[in-house]
Amino acid sequence: MKLAGLFKVSLITSALVLAGCGGDVNITPTTNDNRVDNSQDVVAPDTGNGNGNGGDVDKDAGGDTDTLVCASYTMGGKEFKGELDAVKKNCVYNTEFANNAKDITSSFEIKALSSGGAHIFQGALFIGEDVDTSKGGVVNTDGPTLTIEAGATIAFTKAENFVRIARGAQISAVGEVDKPITFTSIKEIDGDATTVPAMQDWGGIQINGMAQTVECSKTEAEQNQCNVDAEGVVSYYGGNNNEDSSGSLQHVVVKYAGFGVEGDELNSITLNAVGSGTTVDYVHIHNGYDDGIELFGGTVNIKHIVVTETADDGIDWDTGWKGKGQFILVQTLTQGNHGFETDGGKKDPSTADGQDRATTVSYPTIANATVVSNGVQGPRGYGAGMEMKEWGKAQLHNMLFVNAGTEAGTGCFDLYNEKDKSTSMGVHANANAGEIAFKNSVFACGLNFEEVEVPLTDDLANFDIEAWFTKPENGNKLIGFKDFASVLGDNGVATKGSMLDKDGNTVAVESSKLSQQDSFFEDVAYIGAIGESETDTTWAKFVAMSLERTK
């Protein structure tokens, strides 16, 4: 059963029970939650000091007072508050405060707890009203904001619980390099040595925006009737505003997230038709079950991203994403699928239906990315470099893929044409036309390219992927894999100032400079996500702290 279907059954059951009692039916439950719970609920003890709903707590017997403030909001004339666990110095939020059938339409703030404690949620946290505009709903473009203070830690107790930001709502999660905002599993912070955090402990972060996606027609977008079903609990995204803002994720850490079944999954971070007004910068994702970040359409940009030991893809984009990205590091030594998996969209652009879309196929520009993999088989596939499919396009600069694998499925790059075949708008045709292009990039891999899935015919019958990649004017190099130390610095991810190929020869590659074309991009002297000599910048510190979290 799909995850979304499971939740719908729970909601229908609750509504029928309420209807049987007579009177008005309120389908927003309070503490009713009939889902299977494989974890123990966190109980906030009675402190005996009158501070069960948050407030001042004596920090020590000397009389100093440390103020621990649990989050609260008022909705429908009722105040909802987290409860203070004065022993563990945590704030606990039960399913009356937040659950998967409750859209919170009031803004509130989650503050960092000076005790070092965590905000523990026993239910899903849905911010903003989710509406289907095709059924008369109207998106409130001035919806609520969830504000999270730098240094705050937020933990979830169940696999199916996640953070969802609805269209028109915002999240303002702005941390600092030494005070990141952390989203994690209860098992990491419960102080119990017998519980070990792992991927799928909770659902992750999902943001629904109002930018364009190929999943809606031009007419639907223009008439505010674009309503695409999000994966997980059914909710809606999409629109016609590519400059839409859903807020900010900055200096954010997401650990042990991801949940669901194939085709209906929650990623560590899911960005659904999110607009360019949104900021996603300095984000570390660790031990996620599905993708690190998956982008469905939209125009949001991503920068300074670290993905470590995620079971599926590091970065996955689909359905017409046209954003930009720079400084992206994916390291999966013990598992992982592709560093990048990319799709143009679910509609063949050569058909009439494919052409009647709100936007065209995915076509981002990415610069300075590194993918490091052993090529081992994990729960979602072999560790590999990048797979492009379904009519997609991309401009890729200063990329460094390092992979020890030599078996089929571990290749540095794959133009996967199962659906595209040899069509004039397929991935091989796009590559031939320069609409998929690597510039100033290096493959240091045991296997450079995967075999073509569907034999190429007609004008593409003689397409040679190695000759395409190594065109002299593009400045790319295939250097083979000798060992990680030949290409990467002591930390295992930074590009060496002087790389060596598999035969021990020095390799020099000049990086692309893109800042004059687009101010989003920063010009650097190295290829890959980070250079060996970069040690004192905020990015270098963020990478170092991210790698430390994986130990």
Image (cartoon, rainbow, N blue to C red):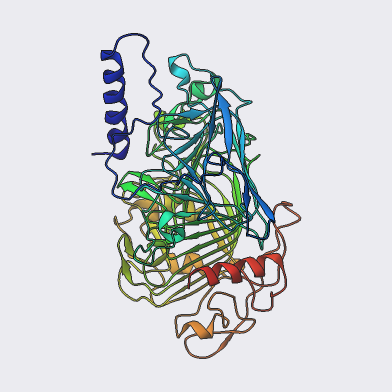
Residue 233 visible in the picture: yes
Q: Nearer the viewer, residue 442 or 252?
A: 252
Q: Is residue 95 left or right of residue 3?
A: right
Nearer to the camera, 257 or 110: 110
**Direction bottom: furthest residue:** 504
The total number of labels drawn is 0
From the top left corner, tell me how far across and down residue 242 is, in percent: 61, 34
Name the residue rendered at 64%, 55% in the picture: 114
Residue beneath the point at 70% across and 65% down: 538
In the image, what residue occupies the spot 50% across and 44% down?
362
Closer to the camera in the image, 278 or 150 = 150
| Location of residue 129 in the rendering, given as x and y in whole percent from the top left corner | 51, 26
What is the x, y in percent for residue 450?
Answer: 35, 66
Up/down of 103 relative to 471, above or below: above
Position of residue 161 measured from the top left corner of the image (x, y, whole percent)? 40, 43
Task: List the single residue furthest toward the top.
Answer: 23
Residue 528 visible in rendering: no
Q: Residue furthest left?
A: 1
The N terminus: image quadrant: top left
446 and 271: which is toward the camera? 271
Residue drawn at the location 58% of the way across and 81% of the way down: 489
Q: Is residue 151 left or right of residue 4?
A: right
